[in-house]
Structure formats: C-alpha cells, structure tokens
C-alpha cells in the first residue's frame, strides 16, 4: 500500500440480484434527490415565502439557516442514536421524518412554525447520506466501494439540474407551499422504495453511544471535518453570490442566471461520477487534487467572470472538482472513524453545511467592504489553500501512525 492509497473500509458484498441492486441504488439516489431539492429550492422561492408568511426577504432567509442548523444537529445525533439499528430501517425512518418536516413546512401558518419545520426537515439530511453510503459499500463488490458511494451521492447534482428548477417553477405558479408538498411526497416515495428494494445489510449490533462518540477522540476525524468546513467553504464563498456576479461582472441579464446554475449542476453530476472512480484509486490523493484544483479554478474565475463563455466553462470545472472532493471527504470520514462508521459517514454533511455558512458569510464581508463580486472568489482561494494545509497535517499524522504501527509489528 502506498502512502496516499487508503481504502475507506473493508467491504462485505451483500448477495442480491443485479436488478435488485440497481433498484436499491435508484431508491437511495431518489432520497438524495429529494434532499437536494428541498435544500436549495428555498433560495429560489424566498420572495414568495416572505410574502406568504408576512416577513421581509432577509428574514425569510433564516429559513435556509434553520435547515442548515437541522443538518448540523441531526447528523451526529442520529448517527449516535441509530448506530445499532438495522440500516434499512434507519433509512426508512429518516425519510419519513424528512417527509414530515417538509409537509409541516407546507402547512406552516406563520414564519416561526416554518423555521421550526425547516429544522425538522434538515435533521435527517446528513444521517441519511451517511447510512446510505454505508449501505452502498455493503452492496458493492470488492474494490468498487467508492463508485457505489459516488452513485448514491448523484441525487444532489441531479436535484440541482432537475428537481430545484421544477420545484421552483411549481412554487412560482401554484404557490410556494406546493414545492414543499412535492418534496414531502418524494420523501414518502423513497421510504417505500427503500422498504421494497434495499436488502438487509450488516449492522453493528455491538455499537453503543460511547463507542460512536469514541470517534470524536480521533484527531483524524476532526481534521477531516475541518477540511470539509474550510476547503468546501471556498466554493460557497463564490457560489453564494453567483447571481449578482452574472449580472454585475459578466454583464448578462437575469435570464442568464439559470444557465449558470444548470451548468453548475451538470458539473456536479460529472464530478460526483468521476469522484467515485478517483476514490477507488486513492482517497487522500483525490482530496489533494480537489483542494489544489478548486484554488486554481477559483482564481481563474476572478478573470473569467468578465466573459460569458469562459465564466460558464470555469464554473462547470469548479463544480466537477468540488464534487469529487466531497466524495473523497465522505470516504475519508468513513475510514478514519474506526468502528464508529455511522457517525463518521453522517458527519460529512454537517461539516459541509458549516462550510456553506462560513463561505457565504466571508464572501458577504468582502462584498460589503466594496471589493466587488469577484472578491469572494479570492476568499475561496484562501479557504481552499487553508484546507490544503489541513490535508497536509492529516497526511503527516497518517504517515507517522503508519510508521509507528510498522515499528511495533
């Protein structure tokens, strides 16, 4: 085994027909599709939501933060509580709770109830992806675990391409509540599909709250979470302000913004597919390539943003690189968490939502100082390089630990 060639975990393939495995994978992708749709559709319907619950647009934006807070809280909480339970049962429970949260969002009578409902909807987000990743690895043949995880995570880029635009259109024409009703139905459909098609996979009957929390004693777990929160935050520093960048820097009309969003979604689809193959080659190498590539491309975007075609192409490449970076983070957490597989797998999306908040906040600061809409991309460069420094520390500890094990063998 070479220095950076790390496998996420031992694979135990589950016996099932190819047709059922395909149906199981589609069921898991459907859940990710619903999650990705509800995570981003609120951004597209903020004016309608604000009017509907009687608040201004900045206040309505707290509904987005509420969902992110639910993700950060729910990922470790449900991972610890549910570690001993059969994974298929957990996936069904997560999707039912997800559906309930979105249905409550659809019927919320006032803004406070909407915020509470968005927290509930966000709670199962990270835990679902974590457990779904573990199930995908269980279902995969040896040497294909990374590709299996990459396929499961395709739900979010597919949502950005199809689900978010469709739900936004529905919300604009039938009322914002209809978008949440749609996602609630997707959540229930996923629960049914998981019950019907996902085979029973191994679970850790010996897992306890103490053993799961034991992962938090591992420096590599915290380092990997920090890599996600900082390194992925670089992309969010830029992407959070893509709409005003298109209109004020690229000098295109608002009608061009959906094209940029679609381009980003397509890049995410390609990057997630590619990431599944790269991490089967090497998880850490993929993380290094992702960090360096993101920094270089964000720096390029500060120039490319002034020109329509280069801007679109650069945004596409940013989405590709950051997406395979996310797949690598998912596998790395599953590897370094030791026996606390559920907590490790679920925590990735908690760190990514922290990245969302950090990147958007820092990007907003530099814009408020009058440095222009390309300044957030420079912030993103800095965050990506900082993430690379954390990766270097993680690799150094990895090497030291390997050498120590060899010396005592």
Image (cartoon, grey):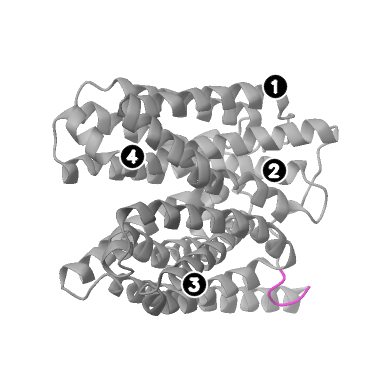
The numbered mark, 4 or 3, whose residue comes first in the sequence reads: 4
Label disc, if present, on residue 42 of the rendered structure = 4
Please tell me whether the stretch drawn in magenta is mainly helix, strand or loop: loop
Say which of 6 and 113 sits in front: 113
Q: Quadrant of the C terminus?
A: bottom right
Say which of 288 and 55 sits in front: 55
Q: Is residue 191 visible?
A: yes
Structural distance between the alpha carbons of marks 1 and 4: 31 Å
> Which type of secondary structure does the marked residue at label 2 adopt?
helix
The numbered mark, 1 or 4, whose residue comes first in the sequence reads: 4
Structural distance between the alpha carbons of marks 1 and 3: 40 Å
The numbered mark, 3 or 2, whose residue comes first in the sequence reads: 2
Instruction: Kindly identify the residue that appears in the image at 72 percent across and 46 percent down.
Output: 137
Q: Which residue is mark 1?
A: 196
Q: Position of residue 79 (x, y in %)?
A: 52, 40
Q: Is residue 389 visible?
A: no
């Amino acid at each position: 085994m070479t220095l950076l060639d790390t496998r996420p975990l031992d694979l135990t393939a589950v016996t099932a027909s190819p047709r059922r495995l395909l149906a199981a994978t589609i069921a898991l992708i459907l859940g990710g599709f619903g999650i990705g749709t509800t995570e981003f559709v609120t951004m597209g319907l903020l004016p309608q939501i604000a009017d509907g619950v009687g608040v201004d647009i900045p206040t309505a934006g707290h509904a987005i933060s509420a969902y992110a807070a639910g993700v950060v809280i729910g990922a470790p909480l449900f991972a610890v509580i549910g570690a001993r339970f059969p994974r298929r049962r957990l996936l069904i429970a997560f999707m039912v709770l997800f559906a309930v949260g979105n249905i409550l969002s659809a019927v919320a009578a006032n803004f406070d109830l909407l915020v509470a409902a968005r927290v509930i909807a966000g709670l199962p987000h990270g835990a679902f992806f974590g457990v779904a990743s573990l199930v995908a690895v269980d279902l995969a043949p040896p040497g294909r675990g990374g590709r299996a995880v990459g396929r499961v995570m395709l739900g979010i880029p597919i949502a950005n391409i199809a689900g978010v635009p469709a739900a936004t259109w529905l919300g604009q024409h039938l009322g914002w509540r209809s978008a949440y009703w749609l996602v609630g139905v997707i959540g229930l459909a996923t629960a049914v599909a998981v019950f019907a098609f996902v085979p029973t996979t191994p679970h850790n009957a010996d897992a306890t709250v103490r053993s799961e929390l034991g992962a938090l004693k591992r420096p590599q777990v915290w380092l990997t979470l920090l890599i996600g929160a900082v390194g992925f935050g670089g992309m969010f520093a830029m992407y959070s302000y893509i709409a005003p960048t298109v209109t004020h820097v690229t000098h295109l009309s608002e009608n061009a913004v959906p094209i940029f969003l679609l381009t980003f979604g397509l890049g995410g689809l390609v990057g997630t597919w590619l990431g599944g193959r790269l991490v089967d080659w090497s998880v850490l190498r993929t993380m290094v390539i992702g960090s360096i590539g993101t920094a270089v491309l964000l720096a390029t975007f500060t120039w490319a943003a002034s020109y329509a075609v280069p801007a679109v192409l650069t945004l596409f490449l940013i989405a590709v690189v950051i997406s395979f970076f996310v797949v690598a983070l998912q596998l790395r957490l599953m590897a370094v968490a030791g026996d606390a597989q559920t907590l490790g797998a679920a925590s990735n999306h908690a760190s990514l939502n922290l990245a969302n908040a950090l990147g958007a906040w820092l990007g907003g600061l530099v814009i408020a100082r009058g440095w222009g809409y390309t300044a957030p991309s420079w912030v993103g460069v800095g965050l990506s390089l900082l993430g690379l420094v954390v990766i270097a520390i993680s690799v150094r500890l990895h090497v030291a630990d390997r050498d120590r094990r060899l010396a005592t063998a």
